[in-house]
Image: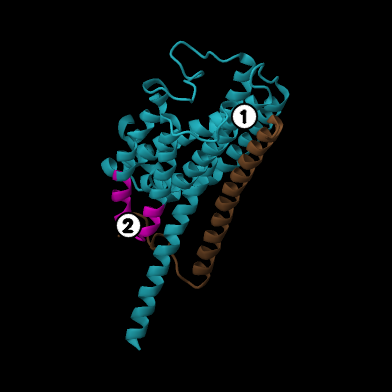
Chain colours: A brown, B cyan
Amino acid sequence: MMSHAAYVFTSYGIATLTVLGLVAWVVLDGHARRRELAELEASGIRRRSAEQAPGETR
Amino acid sequence: MSENSLAIRKFSDLANPTRFLALADRLLPWLTGLTVLFFVVGLWLSFTTEGDYQQGETVRIMYVHVPAAWLSMMCYSVMALAALGTLVWRHPLADVSSRAAAPIGACFTFLALVTGSLWGKPMWGTWWVWDARLTSVFVLFLMYLGLMALNRAIDDPARSSKVSAILVLVGFVNIPIIKFSVEWWNTLHQPASVMRLDGPTIDPEFLWPLIVMAIAFTLLFFTLHIAAMRNEILRRRVTALRRLAARAAGRGARAQ
């Protein structure tokens, strides 16, 4: 039988780990996508909207 | 230009992913700061207020459990609104919003289930019972996982968005079931004590940390959701550019 404090700290511990994991995933995902975009742009591949006049979408 | 069409223009500007990215970059630092601030105050209140005369220290689990449970339902409601946006207005950001929200909602639902279990063991004497509230929240968790799997299974967002939106709307029936399960059925879980028509029945000693933590969790959700939407837009751009590059490479190979 765990003490009451142990249940409280386990709860907060798991909550902290889950939230930090979620934040880390969102931040790392963002960095990875930005890096990919930068690599594509460096190799000369750009979005059509960045080359053409606005208004032409397709 | 009439005022009305100006308002419509402003609204449709928000639908433009590029505008959204600019807005996200401007909003995110502020939202992050506010989230951290509310968590600092909320956690401080959570551990400095008194324990309950019956529940002792375990009442502090409530300050994580209840906001996580609220958020698990709010996140699904946001997804349902986004699904309407996909099906009715074909809003280009609606599918992005719904897709980005699913993993966040799954995490909050997971937290609600785990902290509920850790609260149930010392207070009810059991980790889990298959009563209406616990079961319906578990079903919500499975729905989040199912939607994530579906979104990953179909590569092309143009095809997956409609299927996913219909599934989200069908699953929305579960939200009122979760909310009212404690009134419709005889559950081990207690009925609502904050969101009631006759006002909160909870002592102010517990209400304040709960409110601050609920605001902190809500801010956390919106911060993460906007950041995840930004990531999803970038992911789609990368995919589109790679396709463009592959097509250009194919043309180049044929020309030689």
Look at the image and tell me in which quarter the N terminus of chain B lies. Answer: top left
x then y, percent, for residue B17: 42, 49
Instruction: Using the numbered discs, state the Cα–Cα distance from disc 2 to disc 1 in whole angstroms.
Output: 60 Å
Question: Residue A4: in sight, yes or no?
Answer: yes
Q: Dot 2: what SS?
A: loop
Residue B162 disc label: none
| Viewer-nearest residue: B182 or B159 | B182
Image: B144 above or below B180 = below
Q: Is residue B1 left or right of residue A42?
A: left
Which amino acid lies under the numbered mark 2 shown in the image of this protein? Thr
x then y, percent, for residue A16: 64, 41
Q: Is residue B47 magenta?
A: no
Query: Dot 2 corresponds to which residue?
Result: A57
Look at the image and tell me in which quarter the C terminus of chain B lies. Answer: bottom left
Query: Dot 1 corresponds to which residue?
Result: B122
Magenta residues span: B149-166
> Which chain does the residue under circle 1 lie in?
B
> Which chain does the residue under circle 2 lie in?
A
Quadrant hosting residue B131: top left
Q: Residues within 10 Å of mark 1 (few under 14, many from 20)?
A: some
Residue beneath the point at 54% across and 55% down: A30
x then y, percent, for residue B218: 53, 33
Q: Residues within 10 Å of mark 2 (few under 14, many from 20)?
A: few
| Viewer-nearest residue: B224 or B54 | B54
Q: Is residue B153 magenta?
A: yes
Image: B253 above or below A19 = below
Question: Residue A47: in sight, yes or no?
Answer: no
Residue beneath the point at 48% across and 44% down: B106
| Viewer-nearest residue: B234 or A52 | B234
Residue beneath the point at 39% across and 44% down: B143
Q: Dot 1: what SS?
A: helix
Is the Cβ of the residue at disc 2 closer than 8 Å to that at disc 1? Answer: no
